[in-house]
Amino acid sequence: MTKDLLGRHRAVLPDWLALYYEEPLEITHGEGRHVWDSEGNKYLDFFGGILTTMTAHALPEITKAVSEQAGRIIHSSTLYLNRPMVELAERIAQLSGIPDARVFFTTSGTEANDTALLLATTYRRSNTILAMRNSYHGRSFSAVGITGNRGWSPTSLSPLQTLYVHGGVRTRGPYAALSDDDFIAACVDDLKDLLGHTRPPAALIAEPIQGVGGFTSPPDGLYAAFREVLNERGILWIADEVQTGWGRTGDHFWGWQAHARSGPPDILTFAKGIGNGMSIGGVVARAEIMNCLDSNSISTFGGTQITMAAGLANLSYLLEHDLQGNARRVGGLLIERLRSVAAQVPGVREVRGRGLMLGVELVKPGTDEADPQAAAAVLEAARAEGLLLGKGGGHNTSALRIAPPLSLTVAEAEEGAAILEHALRSTIQ
C-alpha cells in the first residue's frame, strides 16, 4: 500500500517536494507524543510535524473545540465580524509584549513573514532588508529572497535588496573563537560597517533560534545590541517566532525575550505551534506600523472560525498546563543526556538549543566537515527503532532536529534519548 501511494505521489507532485526516508512512511493517526504509520508501526514523535504539533497529537480539548465549531460555521472570511478571531487576537496581543499591538492572521509562517516584509518596507519606504546568514523565512518569492540558506533558496531573483549580517551561528564563521561578549561586539561592529555602505534599510528580520538552519543561535543579548544600532537609524526589528514562539525554548515564551534588554521587536511573526496542526499564522505589530497600508486588504482563510477555535483551545491548554515550564524541565534533562552521549561519539560536533528545540550537528570524525550522509543514516536508524527526528542545517543538512510536543514526559525523553544514542553509535564509527 505504501509503495503504491509513493508511486502516485511521484506521478502528480513536484520532484522538489522532499520526502524523508529511503522508504517513505504514511502517518495515519497519533495520540499524545506518538504516531502510527499505515503498516501499524508506532513511533515516538520527536519532530511534531516540523514543530507544528506543539501540545500533543489528538488532544481532546482541541478536537472538541474544532468539532463544535465545525457544527456551527467553519468559515465566513475577514469581511464579517468573527468572535473567535477577535478573542485569539486579544490574547496574542497581550502575550506579545508589543505595546498598542495589532494582530493580523494568515494561514502560514511564510505568509506571516511576507506580510511583515510588506509592512516594514511600506512603513520605511525602503526595499532593503537585513537578514541573518543561515536563516530561513519561508517559501514565498519575498521570503526566499531573504533566506540565507542555500539549500532552501531556489532563486536569486527578489523584489528586495537583502544584506546578510553575521551572528546567527555561534560556533562557525569568523567570530567563532571569540568569547560571547567579544562575539556580540564583533557582530555589532560588522552591522555598523554594513550600514555605512548602503541606503537605509527597512528592517532586520531574525529568528531568535534558526530553525531550518539546524537550531543555531547567537549568545543571549545579540539582538538587543543590534536593536540599539537599529533604533538610532529608525530601522525596524522583525522577530520571526514561527518556530521559537509559545514557550518552546523553555526559558522564555518568545525567543526574542532572550534579547529583551532593548525592548520588544517592532514586528513579531508566528505560526506552526499555535494551531497544533491547524493552519494558523500571523503578525503582531505596533498600531502605527500595522495601519500604515493605504489600500484594502483581507485574508480569505486567515482567521477563519475553525482554526481560531483550535488556536484558542490550544493556547489555553498550553498556559493552563505550563507547557513552557515542562519544556524547560524536560528539555534540560534531554540536552544533558544527549551531551553525555555526544562526548563519546566522535562524529557529533555539537549538541545545542534550549527547551524542546535541540540540534545535534554531525561531522566526519576528526574534522569539522559536515556529514549529511551520517545525518541521513541516523534518521533511518532511529526510525527503525521507533523514533522520528528531523534534520536541517546550513552546512549541508548535517544537523538532527529534535522538537517533540511540549507535553513530552521525562520517561519519553529518556526513551527517545536511548534510541538516538543507539542510532548514533551504530551508524557513526
Image (cartoon, helix red, strand yellow):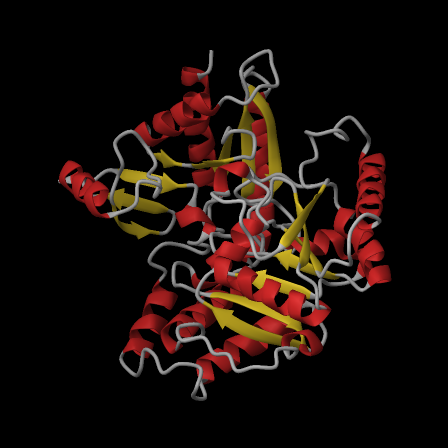
> Horizontal and vertical percent for residue 138?
50, 52
> Horizontal and vertical percent for residue 426?
41, 16
Horizontal side of 119 relative to 275 (left or right) equals right
Near-viewer residue (254 or 204): 204
Residue 42 in the image: above or below residue 338: below
Horizontal side of 206 relative to 193 (left or right) equals left
The residue shown at (57%, 67%) is: 283
Residue 90 in the image: above or below residue 96: below
The residue shown at (51%, 28%) is: 398
- The part of the image, by quadrant, that contains residue 292 is bottom right
- The part of the image, by quadrant, that contains residue 47 is top left
Near-viewer residue (138 or 366): 138
Q: How many marks?
A: 0
Q: Is residue 248 visible?
A: yes
- The part of the image, by quadrant, that contains residue 216 is top right
Horizontal side of 116 relative to 266 (left or right) equals left
Q: In the current view of this chain or complex, which residue is farthest to the bottom? A: 81
The residue shown at (85%, 40%) is: 185
The residue shown at (44%, 63%) is: 275
Q: Give the quarter of the figure containing the N terminus.
A: top left
> Horizontal and vertical percent for residue 105?
50, 71
> Horizontal and vertical percent for residue 386?
33, 33
Q: Is residue 243 visible?
A: no
